[in-house]
Image (cartoon, rainbow, N blue to C red):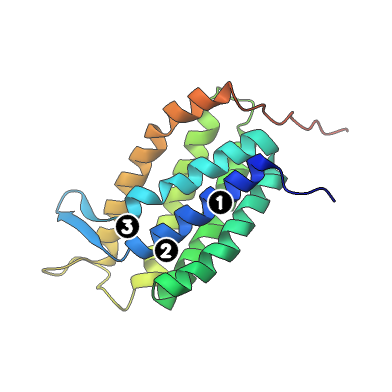
C-alpha cells in the first residue's frame, strides 16, 4: 500500500476543515427574510465540501473520492463534537455521508456529459438531501417545523440554506472549470460485457 498522495492529503485536509467549521458556524443565524428563509453561516462554508468532493472525484475517481469523504467524516465528526452540540455532530455526520455519496454517484454517472453537468447536478442533489436530513435531525424538537411567529423554523432553515447552497453550486462551476486544465481526470472505466 502506498502512502497518501499530496493531492489526496490536500483534499482530506480541505474536507475536514470545511466540515468542522460548518458544524460550528451553523449554530449562528445570519438573517431571516420571509422569502429567502433563515440563513446560517454554515450555508456559506458547507458548499466547499461538495466542491472538494467533485475535484477529488474528477482527479482520483469515485473510490478515492469516497476515501476523502470517509476521512472527512471521521475527523469532522470528532472535531464537531468538540466545537458543536452532539445533535449537530450526529446530524452533520448522517447528512454528510448521504449527501456526499450521492454527489459521487451522480457525478460519476454524468462524468462523460458536458463538463458542468456532473459537478452541478451532483452538488445540487447532494445539497438538497444533505440539507433536509441535517436540519430535520439537528433541529426538529428544538425549533418548530413550520414558521410560527418570531424565530427560525426547521422549514425556514432548510429553505434559506438550500437557496444559498444551490447558488454556491452554480458559483463553484467557474473555479471547477478553471482547475479542470490542471487536474488530470480519472480515465473512465469501461465495463466488459
Instruction: Count residues near mark 3 (Cα–Cα under 10 Å), then give few for <14, some for 14-19, many for 20+.
Output: many
User: At x 56% / y 39%, what residue is drawn?
Assistant: 54
* Disc on the earlier residue, 3 or 2: 2
Q: Are marks 2 and 1 in contact (CB under 8 Å)?
A: no
What whole-number distance in Å separates the C-alpha atoms at marks 2 and 1? 22 Å
The answer to whether any part of residue 116 appears in the image is no
Q: Are marks 3 and 2 in contact (CB under 8 Å)?
A: no
Q: Position of residue 111 (x, y in %)?
A: 63, 30
What whole-number distance in Å separates the C-alpha atoms at marks 3 and 1? 27 Å
Q: What SS does tag 1 mark?
A: helix
User: At x 62% / y 28%, what residue is drawn?
Assistant: 183
* Disc on the earlier residue, 3 or 1: 1
Q: Nearer the viewer, mark 2 or mark 1?
A: 1
Instruction: Count residues near mark 2 (Cα–Cα under 10 Å), then give few for <14, some for 14-19, many for 20+.
Output: many
Q: Are marks 3 and 1 in contact (CB under 8 Å)?
A: no
Q: What SS does tag 2 mark?
A: helix
What whole-number distance in Å separates the C-alpha atoms at marks 3 and 2? 9 Å
Q: Quadrant of residue 110?
A: top right
Mark drawn on residue 134: 2
Instruction: Count residues near mark 1 (Cα–Cα under 10 Å), then give few for <14, some for 14-19, many for 20+.
Output: some
Mark drawn on residue 158: 3
Q: Quadrant of residue 144?
A: bottom left
Mark drawn on residue 26: none
* Disc on the earlier residue, 2 or 1: 1
Going by the image, does 44 lie left or right of 79?
left
Q: What SS does tag 3 mark?
A: helix
Mark drawn on residue 13: 1
Q: Position of residue 159 (x, y in %)?
A: 28, 53
Going by the image, does 171 lie left or right of 18?
left
Going by the image, does 15 lie left or right of 47?
right
Amino acid at each position: 500500500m502506498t502512502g497518501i498522495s499530496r493531492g489526496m492529503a490536500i483534499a482530506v485536509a480541505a474536507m475536514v476543515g470545511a466540515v468542522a467549521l460548518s458544524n460550528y458556524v451553523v449554530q449562528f443565524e445570519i438573517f431571516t427574510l420571509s422569502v429567502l428563509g433563515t440563513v446560517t453561516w454554515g450555508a456559506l462554508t458547507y458548499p466547499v465540501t461538495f466542491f472538494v468532493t467533485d475535484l477529488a472525484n474528477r482527479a482520483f475517481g469515485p473510490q478515492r473520492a469516497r476515501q476523502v469523504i470517509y476521512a472527512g467524516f471521521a475527523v469532522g465528526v470528532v472535531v464537531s463534537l468538540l466545537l458543536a452540540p452532539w445533535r449537530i455532530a450526529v446530524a452533520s455526520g448522517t447528512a454528510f455521508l448521504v449527501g456526499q455519496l450521492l454527489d459521487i454517484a451522480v457525478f460519476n454517472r454524468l462524468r462523460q456529459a458536458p463538463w458542468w453537468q456532473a459537478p452541478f447536478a451532483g452538488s445540487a442533489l447532494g445539497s438538497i438531501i444533505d440539507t433536509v436530513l441535517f436540519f430535520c435531525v439537528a433541529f426538529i424538537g428544538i425549533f418548530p417545523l413550520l414558521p410560527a411567529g418570531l424565530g427560525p423554523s426547521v422549514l425556514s432553515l432548510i429553505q434559506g440554506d438550500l437557496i444559498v447552497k444551490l447558488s454556491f453550486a452554480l458559483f463553484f462551476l467557474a473555479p471547477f472549470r478553471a482547475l479542470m486544465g490542471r487536474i488530470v481526470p480519472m480515465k473512465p472505466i469501461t465495463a466488459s460485457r
